[in-house]
Amino acid sequence: MEQNFDICVIGGGIQGAGIAQAAALSGLSVALLEKSDWGAGTSSKSSKLIHGGLRYLESFEFGLVRESLKERRILLNIASDIVKPNWFYLPVYKNSQHKSWQLFAGLSLYRILAGRKNLAGFKRLPRAQWKQLNGLNTADLETVFAYQDAQTDDRALTRRVALSAQSHGASLLCPATVISAEKTYKGYSVRLNLNGDSKTIYCRYLVNAAGPWINPVAKTITPTPPMVDVDLVQGTHLEFTEQLSDRCFYLEAQQDHRAIFVMPYKGGTLLGTTEKVFSGNPDQVNPSPEEIEYLLEVIRYHFPHFNHKPIKAWAGLRVLPSGDKTPFSRSREVQFAESENYLAIYGGKLTGYRATAETAIKRVIKSMGLEKRRRVQDSSKVDI
């Protein structure tokens, strides 16, 4: 095993894999360290959506939406076998928080930000077609919109990106648990447990992309690097063997007006997600009975006939800025923490992993003083 690298990336989720790929494409030697398996954490516990973030328009995050829509188009091109477009149906009831005119305006803006030939269209479903919506509750239903976004297998996507990084020269080290890292005059020495053996590797630059474990990892580094104050927010999903529909539904939870998705998944149905501030060990996150009942109430309200029991419930953790706002209202923009020869990536969306990686590697190359010798290679044409 080569022991000296330009960059060591800690965390084998979609963000870490994307950064390793971007580094390798740019001709840098890179080691990607993962303690269990590629995409085993948050990157396999998402809603499996490649989307522009329609609801982020409400918080005026237009830049994030525009970037996400651009990245959605790229992923549809370079991973077309696992990133698939689908129709999303959005019902509006008399008691819905967002009225029909507001959603029409939002979908119109979504179309403009997406640009031409980018799943940009939407439509209002005629009342005569409501009966075709798989038993959707039509009591007090005012209108139904349909628009397009995309779905994927999040863990498969993460593995593909990690393997792409490897094919361009990255070293994939797994299972590799970081024990400690220490700043040296040349960069960092990183002590890790690799397949049960203690190893030390050296790098000029250290990237922390450990997701929910990002600050615990930072605390193992000497001297302690800067950290961002964040909350870990738990999101629970339910799986059913029965398939409600081959299309997706974007529902407004009657309890608190949050967005809930119902989607086809592995021949059955996936329902999610919740948002609950989590405290404790990220390795021990589990769905709560309250979250499970919350999701079941949402699907029973909108689809009264769908009275099946879930076969599985699982939870993942988002990294969001700490604050007084509800988790649903907090920004999904990526945050960075930097010091000499160190960069940490806080948050990030599955859809935007490639753009996040490009930004991160530009910062790394600039910090290493390599702008004249290296440039970030465009991964938008690299099939994965």
Image (tube, rainbow, N blue to C red):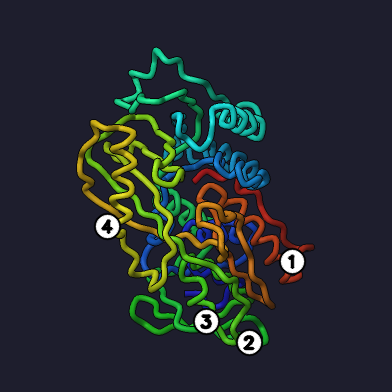
Q: Nearer the viewer, residue 314 or 176?
A: 314
Q: Reading the chain from its start, which is encountered first: label 3 or label 2? A: 2
Tell me the amino acid under the disc marked 1.
Lys
Q: Nearer the viewer, residue 34 or 135?
A: 135
Tell me the amino acid under the disc marked 2.
Thr
Q: Residues within 10 Å of mark 4 (few under 14, many from 20)?
A: few
Examine the rendered structure and indicate whether residue 351 appears above or below residue 80. Answer: below
Secondary element under disc 4, as helix, strand or loop, is helix
Q: Residues within 10 Å of mark 1 (few under 14, many from 20)?
A: few
Q: Which residue is mark 3?
A: 219
Secondary element under disc 3, as helix, strand or loop, is loop
Cβ atoms at labels 4 and 1 below 8 Å apart: no
Q: Which mark is residue 184?
A: 2
Q: Label 3 vs label 4: CA separation?
A: 33 Å
Q: Which residue is mark 4?
A: 289
What residue appears at the point 49 percent right and 59 percent down from the top-left corner? Answer: 166
Q: Reading the chain from its start, which is encountered first: label 4 or label 1? A: 4
Q: Label 4 vs label 1: CA separation?
A: 48 Å
Q: Label 3 vs label 2: CA separation?
A: 17 Å
Q: Label 1 vs label 2: CA separation?
A: 19 Å
Tell me the amino acid under the disc marked 4.
Pro
Q: Reading the chain from its start, which is encountered first: label 2 or label 4? A: 2
Q: Nearer the viewer, residue 93 or 58?
A: 93
Q: Which mark is residue 366?
A: 1
Tell me the amino acid under the disc marked 3.
Lys
Residue 21 placed where, x, y %?
A: 55, 57
Residue 230 placed where, x, y %?
A: 54, 68
Q: Reading the chain from its start, which is encountered first: label 1 or label 3? A: 3
Secondary element under disc 1, as helix, strand or loop, is helix
Residue farthest toward the right in the current orientation of the protein? 372
Question: Between tags 2 and 4, which lies in front?
Answer: 4
